[in-house]
Amino acid sequence: MNSIQRCRYQKVTARFINNSPLAGDMAIISEPQPLLEDFLDHKNNLIAHRFHKHDFFDNFEFLTPYEFKEYLIQRWTLSRYFVPWYCEGINNLKTRKRKLSLEVPGSLAGDIQDLLSYFMAEAKPISRISREQEKAVLQAAISVLTKIVEDEAPINAPSHRQDLLADLAYLGFKEDVFRTLPTIQTLETLKKLSKLVAYSDDQHYPLRTMVTYLVAGEEAVGAEYKHTWPRLRYDYAMTPKKSRFYYNHYKHDNSESGSHTLSFRDVLGMMIVDGKTLAIAKESADKALEARLHFFDQFTGAPKAIKTVKRSLAMAPLLGEGMVRYLRAMAAYQKEEYLGLDFSSLEEIDLNLFPSAFD
Ligand SMILES: [Fe+2]
Ligand SMILES: [Fe+2]
């Protein structure tokens, strides 16, 4: 943790430190943290080697204009759930904080609970982070997520949802946007993402939640638009000035300088305190990225087939136009299969997971 981060960390927890007899313990947590750096390295490697190497992004340049448009429109259906998904996590963290507030440390009930935790954890010492400290960390986590949701829908400015619609209208996709429903794969992605932040009594649930939002909600978005933005820029003449949504998200979710991604560091520094929490954070990052990549799996069939055709053409000039048409037809068929709106298995998806926020 550098001096700026430490300063921000102390600001976040200042109220607690000033009022708590456990300030000494907090000082231990604010030491420089190689564990956090270890986690950030793991997460960066995931983005570099798993995300960017995914078939969809590996073949991004081979997407036809039609496929690129299909992807952007389907992506819109995923973006619509962004705020409800974050609100789900915020509510769950608040529930945990409320639960902790009901437990009075030092009371008979608190002592019995500590004793039970001690035996249930196979006689390992109880976490050195006390309930009061955990509440402070939870509050910091809630603040990070709340700030992002507030950024999504500022009071005196258009929401990101409106900005996205404006960009899609600029691209000429407005009508298609309103006709498109989420595919099964998109709904499955939402379900997977929702599961990763679902409430749990597991004491490491807040850590899993924050890592999921950092990786799937922020880093993956910035990484995705690293591919999308250049294509919008050069194929559709979209400039940073003309773009209200894509350019800003390409910038603010960037892992090196993005304000949203950086805002997770202090909280994760407080949560990743030993080998066990480091392992949990890494595992959560893996799962979050896999869930996020599930969305792109639905687009990989056709571009891959077209890539094969193009490579074959380059290698074997004798391959005639008829064969190219045949392979393209095969690719289109495969794509139809991927994108087909078959809602027969919709009952398996719990649509109540995302209530009310579909404005
Ligand atoms: Fe946004
Ligand atoms: Fe963001």
Image (cartoon, helix red, strand yellow):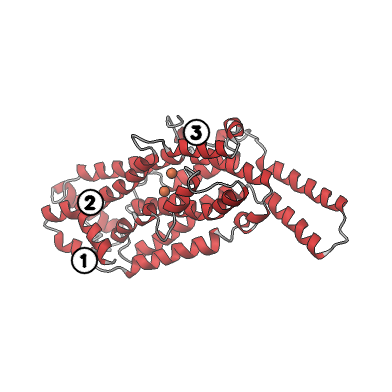
- Position of the C terminus, as image quadrant, is top left
Residue 276, placed above or below residue 227: below
Q: Residue at x 38, y 37 (%)?
A: 153
Q: CA distance from mark 2 to mark 1?
A: 15 Å
- Three-letter code for the amino acid on which mark 3 is drawn: Leu
Residue 88 appears left or right of 14: right
Give the image location of residue 351, x and y in percent: 50, 33
- Residue that carries the numbered disc 2 in the rendered image: 136
Q: CA distance from mark 2 to mark 3?
A: 33 Å
Q: Earlier in the sequence, mark 2 or mark 3?
A: 2
Q: Secondary structure at mark 3?
A: helix
Q: Earlier in the sequence, mark 2 or mark 1?
A: 1
Q: Residue at x 57, y 30 (%)?
A: 178
Give the image location of residue 289, x and y in percent: 50, 55
- Three-letter code for the amino acid on which mark 2 is drawn: Ala
Q: Residue at x 67, y 51 (%)?
A: 63
Q: CA distance from mark 1 to mark 3?
A: 44 Å
- Three-letter code for the amino acid on which mark 1 is drawn: Ile
Sort mark 2 into few (<14), some (14-19) or many (20+) by Cα contacts within 10 Å.
many
Q: Are marks 2 and 3 in contact (CB under 8 Å)?
A: no
Sort mark 3 into few (<14), some (14-19) or many (20+) by Cα contacts within 10 Å.
few
Question: Which numbered disc covers residue 351?
Answer: 3
Sort mark 1 into few (<14), some (14-19) or many (20+) by Cα contacts within 10 Å.
few
Residue 262 appears left or right of 320: left
Q: Secondary structure at mark 2?
A: helix
- Residue that carries the numbered disc 1 in the rendered image: 28
Q: Quadrant of residue 204?
A: bottom left
- Position of the N terminus, as image quadrant, is bottom left
Question: Which numbered disc covers residue 151?
Answer: none
Give the image location of residue 175, x and y in percent: 60, 31
